[in-house]
Amino acid sequence: MSSTAERGRACPHCGQTLALYSTSPFTYSDGLGWGSQTLHVCFNDECPIFVNGWLTMERYGRVGSQRYWYNPVDKEDGVLPVANHQSMRGDILGQVA
């Protein structure tokens, strides 16, 4: 697990530096969106969340996996479903500083 100083910078499941990911243009007031223009997302294909996510999604009758995310605005985190290894990669802005 990462230290408090690292929270939001490194994945607590694999330790890799998180990527800065651009969220959708919906605003929070729409009832949609994240309330933040960016999320911090783990794109490590060897992260346990991603590796084990394939079996987790299969249990729910879905094909895909999951990636860890952290919202720097509200300090919440969780997992996002992804369809394949390339899902969401087009919106990576760089590494979290």
Image (cartoon, rainbow, N blue to C red):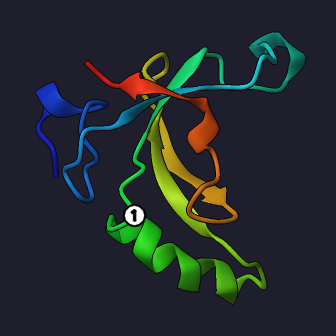
Q: Is residue 28 above or below residue 1?
A: above
Q: What amino acid does circle 1 point to?
A: Asp
Which type of secondary structure does the marked residue at label 1 adopt?
loop
Residue 53: x percent and y percent? 52, 74
Q: Residue at x 82, y 11 (%)?
A: 29
Q: Residue 87 versus residue 70: which sits nearer the camera?
A: 87
Residue 38: x percent and y percent? 54, 20
Q: Is residue 90 above or below residue 71?
A: below
Q: Is residue 10 above or below residue 39?
A: below
Q: Is residue 55 above or below residue 28?
A: below
Left or right of 79, for residue 81: right
Q: Residues within 10 Å of mark 1 (few under 14, many from 20)?
A: few
- How many numbered marks are there? 1
Q: Residue at x 65, y 59 (%)?
A: 82
Toward which corner of the image does residue 7 lie, by quadrant? top left
Q: Quadrant of the C terminus?
A: top left
Residue 12: x percent and y percent? 25, 50
Q: Residue at x 44, y 78 (%)?
A: 52
Q: Residue at x 34, y 70 (%)?
A: 48
Left or right of 87, for residue 74: left
Residue 17: x percent and y percent? 25, 39
User: Pointer 1: what residue?
Assistant: 45
Toward which corner of the image does residue 20 lie, by quadrant? top left
Left or right of 90, for residue 3: left
